[in-house]
Amino acid sequence: MLNRKKIEAVCPVKDIMARYGDKWTMHSILLLGKHGTLRFSELKSSIEGISQRMLTVTLRALQEDGLVKRTVYAERPPRVEYALTPLGESLLEQLVLLSEWAHAHLDEIQKARKQFARKEKQKI
């Protein structure tokens, strides 16, 4: 059980946690972690359901926070690649831990969801 001081310490960083907790950000970080360097089009085609605008917004936010490096090559047409920075790699490590936790507890979570759904259905 976490103590109150640890829980209160989360409050000042909740905006950061909210930014990195959305599905597009997590997916982008995981893909860049898996592949190293990707072009915009490769990222877009690998993230099902993301719009061009949302991917642009997501990548810019990650650049702003120093998690992703954008490299533009002076070619015709210009080639742009994205890769995680060391700070991004450190976040990737935490996302992998979260993923491992989710995998380890998948059965328990699914069971709890089913039980909750049954109880909610009985209320109706």
Image (cartoon, rainbow, N blue to C red):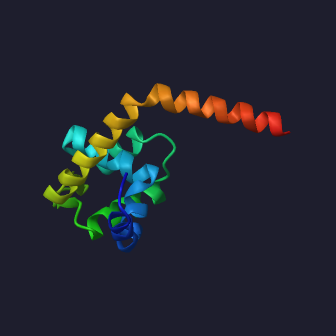
Q: Is residue 38 visible?
A: no
In the depicted structure, whether residue 73 falls above or below residue 109: below
The image shows residue 69 at horizontal and vertical percentages of 20, 60
Coordinates of residue 29 in the picture (x, y in percent): 30, 49
Image check: 81 left or right of 44? Answer: left
Q: To which quarter of the image does residue 70 belong? A: bottom left
- How far across and down, in percent of the image, does residue 53 sit? 47, 59
Q: Nearer the viewer, residue 119 or 73?
A: 119
Query: Looking at the image, which is closer to me, 4 or 59?
Result: 4
Of residues 28 and 7, the one drawn nearer to the viewer in this rendering: 7
Number of labels in the image equals 0
- Quarter of the rendering containing residue 59: bottom left
In the shown orientation, is residue 67 left or right of residue 112?
A: left
- Asked if residue 115 can be seen in this view, the reply is yes
Quarter of the rendering containing residue 117? top right
Q: Residue at x 25, y 45 (%)?
A: 32
| Image position of 71 with respect to 123: above or below | below
The image shows residue 115 at horizontal and vertical percentages of 65, 30
Residue sitting at 72 percent across and 30 percent down? 118
| Relative horizontal placement of residue 98, taking residue 48 as reference (left or right) | left
Up-down relation of residue 104 to residue 23 (above or below):
above
Residue at image point 32% right, 51% down: 40
Residue drawn at point x = 36 percent, y = 56 percent: 2
In the rendered image, which quarter contains the C terminus? top right
> Which residue occupies the foreground of this view, 111 or 86?
111
Q: Residue furthest right?
A: 124
Residue 86 sits above or below residue 95 on the image: below
